[in-house]
Image (spheres, rainbow, N blue to C red):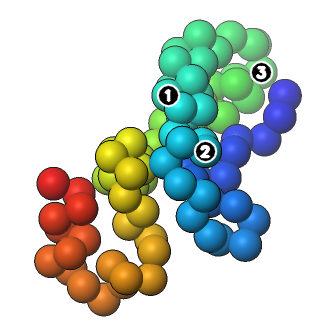
């Protein structure tokens, strides 16, 4: 099993790679997690799926913004709550 990917559109240096880079893969992870849940006697897959679902829930606004081509973590929005609220809407 491979590790979960970096957050949507981010590379190792924390830069945004654009909406087309990783967002489609997040949709695949969401679908895949439903197929994995409940498998394995050790419950390790259930724990991994729970962690993934939690992360997708916590970062749902970021995920939705990246689908629209907006990066909520980019410098221009930091410290500007109104601009961030508009990006999420």
Q: Residue at x 50, y 28 (%)?
A: 27
Tell which residue pokes out farthest to the right in this image. 1
Could you say which disc has been placed on residue 42 in the image? 3
Give whichever of 79, 40 is nearer the camera. 79
Q: Is residue 25 above or below residue 20?
A: above
Mark 3, secondary structure of its residue: loop
| Residue density around tag 3, few if under 14, some if 14–19, many if 20 or more, within 10 Å | few
Lower position in the chain sequence, tag 2 or tag 3: 2
Spatial CA span between label 1 and label 2: 12 Å
Nearer to us of marks 2 and 3 is 2
Nearer to us of marks 3 and 1 is 1
Mark 2, secondary structure of its residue: loop
Contact, CB < 8 Å: mark 1 with mark 2?
Answer: no
Give whichever of 75, 37 is nearer the camera. 75
The location of residue 31, given as percent across then percent down, is 52, 18
How many circles with numbers are drawn on the protein?
A: 3
Residue 62 visible: yes
Could you say which disc has been placed on residue 27 in the image? 1
Mark 1, secondary structure of its residue: helix
From the image, tell me which residue sits under label 2.
Answer: 21
* Quarter containing the C terminus: bottom left
Spatial CA span between label 3 and label 1: 26 Å
Within the image, what quadrant is residue 51 found in? top right
């Amino acid at each position: 099993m491979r590790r979960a990917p970096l957050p949507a559109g981010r590379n190792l240096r924390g830069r945004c790679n654009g909406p087309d880079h990783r967002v489609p893969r997040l949709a695949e992870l969401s679908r895949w997690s439903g197929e994995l849940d409940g498998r394995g006697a050790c419950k390790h897959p259930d724990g991994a799926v729970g962690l993934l679902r939690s992360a997708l829930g916590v970062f749902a606004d970021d995920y939705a913004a990246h689908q629209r081509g907006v990066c909520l973590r980019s410098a221009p929005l930091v410290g500007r709550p109104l601009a961030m609220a508009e990006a999420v809407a």
